[in-house]
Amino acid sequence: ELPSRVTIWEVGPRDGLQNEAATVPVDVKLEFLDRLAGAGLTTLEATSFVHPKWVPQLADAEELLGRLDRRPGVRYPVLVPNERGLDRAVAAGVGHIAVFGSATETFAKRNLNTSVDGQFAMFEPVLARARAEGMEVRGYLSMCFGDPWEGVVSAEQVVRVGKRLLDLGCSQLSLGDTIGVATAGQVERLIDAFVAAGVGVDALAVHFHDTYGQALANTLAALRRGVSTVDSSAGGLGGCPYAESATGNLATEDLVWMLDGLGIEHGADLDALVATSTWMAQRLGRPSPSRVVKALAG
Ligand code: HMG
Ligand code: MG
């Protein structure tokens, strides 16, 4: 059964720009966020409070949030890995954060310099404090389908680690296909495994990268299972600097085109999104990989 409405969780300003070789000037980021809000998107993942040496592209998080013109009705979640990141987020007046864990040991080490258990020790005080401050906390889980170093990741392993994130107090779990290797049957099986383990589909979101061109098919599989929050990035920007062979996220425009065809409400203005991604492509000096942007930009 398809949902009647989908929440688009726009990750372009964070997942997209964190992977650009060139650091995008803060003025361009601010205009990007403003254009995305103007296009009707209501969840804009703005930046990350991670170590600036690990992700120099987002080292301007304080300046960005200090200058951000927050629009009413729009939420601007940010990524926070640890208590130091939470301190920075609190100081910046953030009301919504996301912690990001790994389903596999290798990626926990490469992305967070810890282990699967170690990441929970890191997140626990973050969740406790953030929730005491009244913040909402999303949990990301990376490498839910395949890992470049460990190969196929089993649904049992993903459900085990994902449930720990929910048990810590995350209000939503975003299932990440970090390197874009998932296929639709695997997506159905993983969602079914979560449901069998007592997790409602309303607590799940999906986060697909389009490396193998499967992101939209995987999204449809998740929608058919009742998932109604979908992560995407305008123009298909993105990747992950700590995962080899990861390319961009599902493009927001590709998602919107499909949702329109299915008659599913989302609130975004496709023409405004295409104009934004065309503008951003000019800033980055390369065309958007999104098929819908290519088709509509003329
Ligand atoms: P570490 O080196 O183990 O850090 O890195 P540490 O705790 O040992 O601290 C070392 C120094 O860093 C200390 O400073 C800390 O204060 C400082 P010193 O005392 O030496 O002067 N420090 C910080 N500074 C600023 N902000 C912070 C912070 N934390 C410590 N938050 C750490 C551990 C988690 C910090 C590091 O591994 C890190 O920053 N990792 C982030 C990696 C990242 O951002 N990856 C991309 C996002 S995940 C993703 O894209 C996947 C996703 O899209 C879903 C999917 O597709 O699967 C979400
Ligand atoms: Mg990602």
Image (cartoon, grey):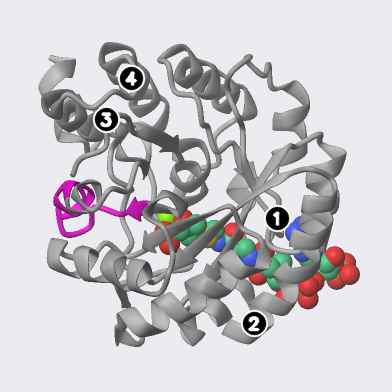
Q: Which residues are magenta?
A: 206-220
212 in the magenta segment:
yes
| Residue density around tag 1, few if under 14, some if 14–19, many if 20 or more, within 10 Å | few
Query: Considering the numbered disc 1 on the image, is that residue within a helix, a strand or a loop?
Result: loop
Inspect this view and state whether residue 94 appears.
yes
Q: Is mark 1 within 8 Å of ligand 1?
A: yes
Q: Residue at x 57, y 74 (%)?
A: 164
Q: Which mark is residue 114?
A: 2
Inspect this view and state whether residue 115 appears.
no
Q: Residue at x 51, y 72 (%)?
A: 163
Query: Considering the numbered disc 3 on the image, is that residue within a helix, a strand or a loop?
Result: loop
Three-letter code for the amino acid on which mark 4 is drawn: Leu
Q: Which residue is mark 1?
A: 52
Which is closer to the viewer, label 3 or label 4? 3
Q: Which residue is mark 3?
A: 4
Which is closer to the viewer, label 3 or label 1? 3
Q: Is mark 4 within 8 Å of ligand 2?
A: no
Rounded to the nearest angstrom, the CA distance separating label 3 from label 1 is 40 Å
Which is closer to the viewer, label 1 or label 2? 2
Q: Earlier in the sequence, mark 1 or mark 2?
A: 1
Q: Which residue is mark 4?
A: 273
Q: Earlier in the sequence, mark 2 or mark 3?
A: 3
Q: Residue at x 61, y 32 (%)?
A: 76
